[in-house]
Amino acid sequence: MRFIFILAVVALLQAPTAQAQQAASIDGIIAIVGDEIITKKDVDRAILPAIELLTTQYASQPEEFNRKLLELRRERIEELIARRLILMDFTNSGYNLPESFIEDQVRDRIRQEYYGDRVKLTKTLQEEGVTMDQYRRNIRENLIVRYLREKHVSQELIISPYKIEVYYRTNQNQFKMEDQAKLRLIELTKSKEAPEAAGAIAAEIIRKLDSGASFEELAAVYSESARRNQGGDYGWVERTRSGLRKEITEAAFNLKAGEHSKVIDTPTACYVVKVEELKPSHIRKLSEVRPEIEKTLTAMEQKRLQEQWINRLKSKAFVRYF
């Protein structure tokens, strides 16, 4: 009988009971970490800041939006679980954070974010539906998470020159630059009343350029873009990632250095472009990209250490997903 009882207890711990599944369905429980729960509401609150950006980026791609949203939810769930585990580890390890330190943090935030006005902070929290105790607890938890993360993950990491060189050799495509052109641009917007006027002015600009006039000076006088004060300077652009209209890019990359285009006529504006310099496609030198490779490898190593640390904490705690 005792053996059967033990098997029954193990079964209960390994699989959610019907009551637990029902509770998860009713209360929206996403996970249990120790004796605390993570709810759907917690996850929704965590992903809210990123929803607007996702909506903007994938407005015309509903399937991709849903895929990205699901991916984001999974990430936030893991972050919330990791947060709970870290806070539990802080308590179980016997660490202590004095209340006086929390109060110092509150005072610093009031001084920096609310111009020293505690009443303004209180009103802001009331508008957000947050109590002062919740605000203080959030500060406390953030400090704990930051402290332990720095202890276990963010210590000084040394990325060897050899690792940087290996990464550079095996990821050449990341450092490939397309054909580039350094441009100046004159933009003439077409008005509804007289759309042909823009083309006439552009033609006159071409005649002046052919006579030796300065493109920079003409851009400062005629261009209607925000870059007119810089003489129409558009900087370096790549052939397929210029950020310009296709007609302008095609015209620009058919010119030689020092040449200007003919009038580029589009439905909304007329343009004249000048190519100041050209660079053929090439692989950036290791000396140019070394700092960004080091930053990438450091981030990768920190992620590995973070996952390793959280997995250790998971192995010592009760974690259940619903």
Image (cartoon, rainbow, N blue to C red):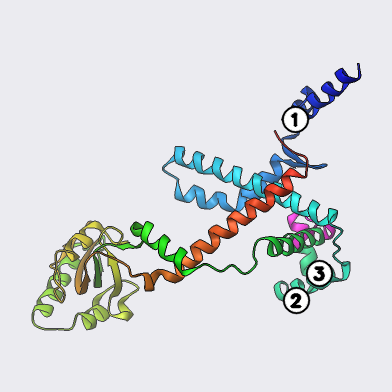
Mark 1 residue type? Ile
Q: Position of residue 189 (x, y in %)?
A: 26, 65
Q: Residue furthest top?
A: 1
Q: Residues within 10 Å of mark 3 (few under 14, many from 20)?
A: few
Mark 2 residue type? Arg
Q: Residue furthest front?
A: 162
Q: Position of residue 215 (x, y in %)?
A: 19, 79
Q: Residues within 10 Å of mark 1 (few under 14, many from 20)?
A: few
Sequence-wise first label, 3 or 2: 2
104 or 251: nearer the viewer: 104
Q: Which residue is the site of mark 3?
A: 119
> Dividing the picture into quarters, in which one does residue 226 lie?
bottom left
Residue 133 belongs to magenta span:
yes
Q: Is residue 109 left or right of residue 293?
A: right
Mark 3 residue type? Val
Q: Position of residue 104 (x, y in %)?
A: 82, 73
Q: Is residue 121 visible?
A: yes
Whole-number angstrom distance, CA of label 1 to CA of label 2? 43 Å
Q: Residue furthest right?
A: 2
Residue name at image x 46 percent, y 63 percent: 163
Q: Which residue is the site of mark 2?
A: 111
Sequence-wise first label, 1 or 2: 1
Whole-number angstrom distance, CA of label 1 to CA of label 3? 38 Å
> In the rendering, which numbered label is found on residue 26?
1
- Give the residues drawn in magenta, as a range: 124-135
Secondary structure under the numbered disc 1 in the rendered image: helix
Residue 45 belongs to magenta span:
no
Residue name at image x 81 percent, y 26 percent: 10
Q: Is residue 80 visible?
A: no
Quadrant containing the C terminus is top right
